[in-house]
């Protein structure tokens, strides 16, 4: 792994369980010693520097609260330790508790709080530390859905206002896209891609990144024809798909990725429309709040999903209906077929 985080940057490390996210934070915090390699903070090699001297604030998943201190005393501990008066430390603490919606529980003790409240308390304590580098390990994971969404924006606004540099670990792709300046996708301890959210979503460099961030339909095939404007790919049972990619050779096996939201389904086709329009049957219809997810079995045996926003939903499409699936060439991303196989590349464990 080789990664540089800029001053004032909000970096999200996104990956599945067991990918190494927490280990990465513990290495940077100094809780775990690296077997090899070098870690620098502010251009200073810190491999042999104790955790308390690294000017970092680590907010672990387990909270690590002081059970004998009240809520406000927990938050004020770090400001007092760095030399602030009790009055100044408590003023900072009250601001953090207000932001995390714990102001009414300032005199409570950790064992009197719910798990979500304890997580908010750990976050408030980290924010009050005024450390240059804030290390957040799933800081919103135990919160209810509505509060988690609300705190995403407040957290980002606050750390930007205070000029923190943040490394925020999460397995929630939506959370990462919302708060991050840049996202590093981690898998098996290796960075698959580190990009701004827009680039990561629209230009994933690997099959794993395309699948883990946003989800997509994946089709296997062979390049059978090339010209100046694109290529033809033969899929299962002879189905031919037109793509814009020209960087592969005839005969090469490839994987095609198409986002679900640009996978179109229609009831009728125009008489002259033939390219990338495939007949199929609706196998499933799932209402998921803001959109409906349709699963369509194509005539060649492939199953693809189409994600349709509710305000654009075609109420006439039901389970069992015969439809056409349109896959526009400009929406198809192409990857060389992985040596380990497609399904191994899609695994998140």
Image (tube, rainbow, N blue to C red):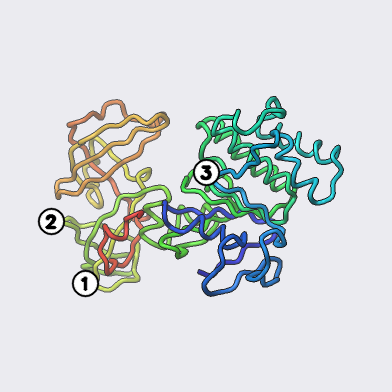
Residue highlighted by disc 3:
175
Taking the view exactly as shown, the residue that stands out farthest to the front is 68
For image coordinates 70% across by 39% down, the residue present is 74
Looking at the rendering, in which quadrant would you find the C terminus? Answer: bottom left
**Front position among marks 3 and 2:** 3
User: Where does the image place residue 156, in percent across and percent down from the top left?
Assistant: 64, 44
Residue highlighted by disc 2:
237
Nearer to the camera, 16 or 264: 16
Nearer to the camera, 116 or 145: 116
User: Where does the image place residue 150, in percent across and percent down from the top left?
Assistant: 59, 33
Pointer 2 or 1: first along the chain: 2
| SS at circle 2 | helix
Crowd class of label 2 (few under 14; some 14 to 19; many from 20; radius 10 Å): few
**Residue 251: mark in rendering:** 1
Figure check: 49 above or below 296: below
For image coordinates 58% across by 43% down, the residue present is 63
Pointer 3 or 2: first along the chain: 3
Q: Is residue 213 left or right of residue 63?
A: left
Nearer to the camera, 227 or 121: 121
Figure check: 145 above or below 345: above
User: Where does the image place residue 7, in percent across and percent down from the top left?
Assistant: 69, 60
| SS at circle 3 | helix
Residue 230 image-quadrant placement: bottom left
User: Where does the image place residue 120, in percent across and percent down from the top left?
Assistant: 61, 37
């Amino acid at each position: 792994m080789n990664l540089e985080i800029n001053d004032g940057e909000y970096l999200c490390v996104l990956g599945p369980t067991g990918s190494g996210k927490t280990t990465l934070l513990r290495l940077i915090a100094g809780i775990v010693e690296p077997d090899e390699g070098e870690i620098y903070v502010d251009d200073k090699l810190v491999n042999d520097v104790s955790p308390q001297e690294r000017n970092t604030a680590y907010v672990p998943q387990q909270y690590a609260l002081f059970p004998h201190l009240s809520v406000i005393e927990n938050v004020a501990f770090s400001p007092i330790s760095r030399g602030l008066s009790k009055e100044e430390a408590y003023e900072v603490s009250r601001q953090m508790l207000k932001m995390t919606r714990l102001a009414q529980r300032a005199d409570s003790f950790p064992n009197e709080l719910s798990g979500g409240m304890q997580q908010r308390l750990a976050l408030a304590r980290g924010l009050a530390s005024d450390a240059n580098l804030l290390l957040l390990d799933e800081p919103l994971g135990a919160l209810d859905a509505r509060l988690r969404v609300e705190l995403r924006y407040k957290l980002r606004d606050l750390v930007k206002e205070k000029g923190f540099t943040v490394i925020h670990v999460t397995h929630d792709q939506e959370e990462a896209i919302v708060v991050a300046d840049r996202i590093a996708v981690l898998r098996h301890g290796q960075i698959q891609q580190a990009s701004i959210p827009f680039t990561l979503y629209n230009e994933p460099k690997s099959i794993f990144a395309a699948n883990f961030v946003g989800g997509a339909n994946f089709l296997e095939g062979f390049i059978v024809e090339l010209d100046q404007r694109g290529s033809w790919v033969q899929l299962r049972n002879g189905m031919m798909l037109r793509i814009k990619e020209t960087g592969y050779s005839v005969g090469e096996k490839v994987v095609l990725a198409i986002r679900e939201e640009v996978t179109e389904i229609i009831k009728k086709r125009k008489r002259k429309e033939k390219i990338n329009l495939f007949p199929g049957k609706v196998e499933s219809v799932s209402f998921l709040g803001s959109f409906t997810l349709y699963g369509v079995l194509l005539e060649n045996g492939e199953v693809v999903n189409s994600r349709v926003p509710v305000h654009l939903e075609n109420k006439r499409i039901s389970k069992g209906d015969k439809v056409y699936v349109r896959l526009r060439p400009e929406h198809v991303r192409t990857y060389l077929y992985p040596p380990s196989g497609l399904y191994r590349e899609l695994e998140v464990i």
